Amino acid sequence: MTIDTDRLDTKIGDVAKKAGCSPATVSRVLNNNPKVGLHVREKVLKAAMELGYVPNGPARALRSTRSRLVGAVIPTLDHAIYATMMNSLQARLAEKDVSIIVSTSGYDIDMEYEQVRLLVERGVEAIVLVGTIHRPETIALLEQRNIAYVFTYTSASTDVGAAIGFDNEKAGRMAARYLLDLGHTRVAMIAGITENNDRAAARRDGFVAEVERNGIAKAGVAVLESAYKIEGGRNAMKRLMERPGRPTAIFCGSDIIAAGVIKYCHENAIAVPGDISVLGFDNLEIAELTTPDLTTVEVPAREMGTIAGDYLLASSTQRQHMRQRELPLRLVVRASTAPIAR
Amino acid sequence: MTIDTDRLDTKIGDVAKKAGCSPATVSRVLNNNPKVGLHVREKVLKAAMELGYVPNGPARALRSTRSRLVGAVIPTLDHAIYATMMNSLQARLAEKDVSIIVSTSGYDIDMEYEQVRLLVERGVEAIVLVGTIHRPETIALLEQRNIAYVFTYTSASTDVGAAIGFDNEKAGRMAARYLLDLGHTRVAMIAGITENNDRAAARRDGFVAEVERNGIAKAGVAVLESAYKIEGGRNAMKRLMERPGRPTAIFCGSDIIAAGVIKYCHENAIAVPGDISVLGFDNLEIAELTTPDLTTVEVPAREMGTIAGDYLLASSTQRQHMRQRELPLRLVVRASTAPIAR
DNA sequence: CTGTTAGCGCTTTCAG
DNA sequence: CTGAAAGCGCTAACAG
């Protein structure tokens, strides 16, 4: 009647013996198979508990091909926008006892392929990816093995994979529209790193297109790139300010970059938003830390994680109706932007 | 000679057939067993490549009891200090093709136990935990199944588990020492949440002990708690300022909290560090975003992740020499602290 | 150096 | 409703 704690590992047969039934029945109980007698079910549960039985996941996965494991490959965990998404995704999956293997690609699609391969090897049932651009081999592998996958941070679904996110091009246009409506005509963008990052590239394209559509800035909109770090934003701003034809408004590809831009302005006595309006992207917690508080475009990172989780948890039939989900983007107006001075 | 892409899944036997050898030999090649003829090895590799063979991890794990999987249970991914650690831990493990299942406990040790149980079920070979305080069942389970585990963010190893981190109590004393040396006698602490968080509690205890050891502050040091959010810090500061006997220096349990404190000061025309010195903890990227820049205690989060990774990757014999690792703490002096005005 | 044999722990037909 | 039997894909003895 006491709990055995000395056995190194007890298996389903031990539980069966103790409960006085067959292993098959134990398995049924553990899998909530309804057609097991109430009495037997109770005995099994009791025996399992007393023996401290823990199922062997790999054995289960091998036999049933259901691993209760999903994978995610994100650029990095060192950026709040991805960490936050992972946090809510993991929380959602945990509610259903599904585990998530997290790996990072460092914004490199070759590395992403390697990681996806490894995840497939681990037997994940589904995979979360970021963005729309991937190696064809990555998608081919997933298709061939019939593993479900979702793209996040984008709303551009392919004919096969699902997409849960937002329209990056539209986001860029929204940013431009806002600055333009404020009366700015000399605008610039510090775009983050667009190589291998279709989302950053789409934002830039949308921004540039909207600005040029308005006929102003014939000389072209200044577009620089920068690492997603405060220092990166600061350096990019320095480069920008050393060029002729200073802008009066700047759209930054991330709040982190915007923070670096504002930092540079402080150091060089450039008034924000007096001399230059600064618009961020992401709405991270730090947007309330800059002086002045940062106007920014909010990215629904938490929500994306939860919805991606729902998608993965759904049955394959249910998934048909969830294959594309465009989340709304919201402009959060704070104090770093202002109408152009006349 | 072309790559087969239509087969749903090819197994080791298929590769063996194509390479003209036995499954055992294929297995040997795939596991880098040295005693396989060079010629055969090449044929196997070629066959595996052409068939697009991906090993079946669960089957391997079942047979060999080596899953190449480790687990981590952290409080949350929504705080940079943990996300950063996970990022470097994952990167280190990925170099050796080891995957990591990440789960979160929300600072709740009962939840932590559930997550650990699930990880054990998944067949992880080792587990990373945060802090020293855990349910006895958690440790018992790990011990019984003979699964390696490491505590991080602490240097207090138990007789069984390893610890990779720093001395939180010492950190608290260091913070107190610094403020005291600046001449402050009326000091306070906003400690984060200490319930179920032995690290935050130890920091508080060290801080209070060092202050009282100096005989000042007979009335006791004011200690408040706060969520690890900007708003939390701001609210706690509000409460603190509404009490009699305002402090001239405040130690915050996290930079996030410190940011909130500084925010409150701005809003209420309290000069930092003129009226009040503010000292943070963590040295997050945001420490350079507050105005003035934040003086803080640097926590080696990235390094902890890498070292924890090394520990998990090591053989059990090597691990004996790595069971305790206290990383140095560094005080990063910026502009939010100053000697007391006379 | 390579093949044969057995079986890891579990779930799943198939009978009863 | 329950048991017996088979075998998921792989690796580890053990021979040769």
Image (cartoon, coloured by chain):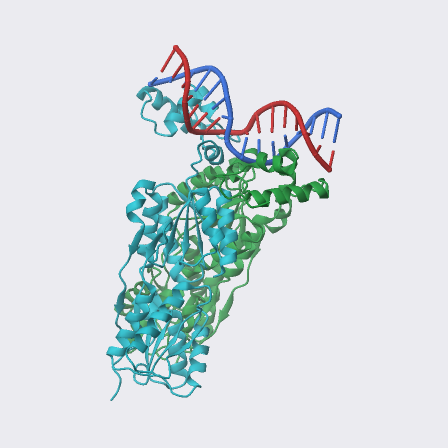
Chain colours: A cyan, B green, C red, D blue
Q: Identify the image quadrant of residue A3.
A: top left
Q: Identify the image quadrant of residue A124.
A: top left
Q: Position of residue A85 (x, y in %)?
A: 37, 56
Q: Is residue B180 above or below residue A75?
A: below
User: Please, which residue is most extreme toward the front here?
Assistant: B1
- Can residue B299 be seen? yes
Q: How many marks overall? A: 0
Instruction: Name the side, left or right, on which B210 lies relative to A280.
Output: right
- Can residue A102 be seen? no
Camera-side residue: A341 or A206? A206
Q: Position of residue B332 (x, y in %)?
A: 48, 71
Camera-side residue: B273 or A50? A50
Q: Is residue A216 above or below residue B43?
A: below
Q: Is residue A1 above or below residue A180?
A: above
Q: Position of residue A73 (x, y in %)?
A: 45, 53
Instruction: Name the side, left or right, on which B174 lies relative to A276.
Output: right
Q: Residue at x 62, y 47 (%)?
A: B320
Instruction: Name the side, left or right, on which B157 lies relative to A226.
Output: right
Instruction: Name the side, left or right, on which A298 lies relative to B123.
Output: left
> From the image, which quarter does the N terminus of chain B lie in?
top right
Camera-side residue: B114 or D11? D11
> From the image, which quarter does the C terminus of chain B lie in?
bottom left
